[in-house]
Amino acid sequence: MTVRIVPGEIAAKDTTARVVLPTVALPKFAPYERVAETIARSARRLPLHKHQASEVLTYVIEGSGTYEVADAPPESIAPGAARMLTAPSNGSHAINSGEGQTIRYFAVVAALPAGGAGATKVQSAQVRESPPQPDGSAVARVAGPNGPLKSAAGLECDAVRFVEDGTSFRRVGHDHTLICYALSGRGHVDSDSLEVGEAAVVTDASGIGLQGQAGFRAILVRAPRMTASAKPTGSGV
């Protein structure tokens, strides 16, 4: 098993993004093209931007705003809102905060398998957290076989919050990769410490133990390994 702790890189203008990938520390990690936490403010409206041969998963952490795709009116989004844009050819979307407000969201861009076709589509869900589990965690399932959003790229995503100190055992699989991003508090992925704004990148593992104190929050994204023939050519989130 390999666990690598990657610090996010911050770029701050009207929009503040803490980018985990691509960075100097982690320039490539297929099938992921970009992994970032973003805080958008209403000082400047962000225009629609394109994605091609990619899938974009967006999950709202705090605040409220709008989600917009080409040729459709903006939709209101709030904490727990999740969107999955699947764009085999071209797809455009944008996220903006409400007037005088701030929105904080997490987004993953993943390359679609080579040779995929079909129309661009968007899935929507309002994700709710489970009751506290015996391991001390509460889980909001965002995407995957047990989540409301179904991914063409094979993405699975959970948002985990520890309501008390505990350890949650999470499946990875030797044919999959995992990114665990810390939103708040402090935790551990097995023996590796994980601070706010850092991500644990896990490969070649059957599973991990995610340890957290009360208040620790993380987002876990799992995806199948991608062959070199797949084409990761996405854009920003």
Image (cartoon, grey):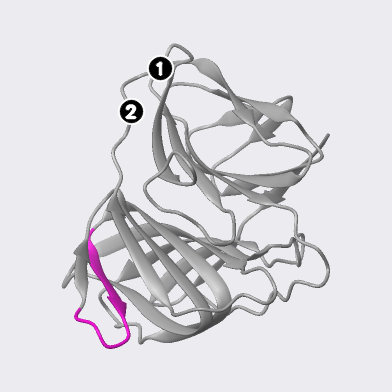
Residue 105 lies in what quarter of the image?
Answer: bottom left
Mark 1 residue crowding within 10 angstroms, few (<14) / some (14–19) / many (20+):
some
Which residue is painted at 79% across and 39% down in the image?
174
- Residue 130's disc is 2
Query: What amino acid is at disc 2?
Result: Ser
User: Any magenta on residue 67?
Assistant: yes
x and y percent of residue 156 in the render? 54, 47
Which range of residues does the magenta coloring cover?
A: 64-73
Specify the amino acid type for callout 1.
Gln
Quadrant of res 137: top left
Question: Mark 1–mark 2 contact, CB under 8 Å?
Answer: yes
Query: Which residue sits furthest left?
Result: 99
Snapshot quadrant of residue 211? top right
Front residue (pair 53, 13): 53
Kindly identify which numbered label has been placed on residue 133.
Answer: 1
- Give how far apart the Cα atoms at labels 1 and 2 are: 8 Å
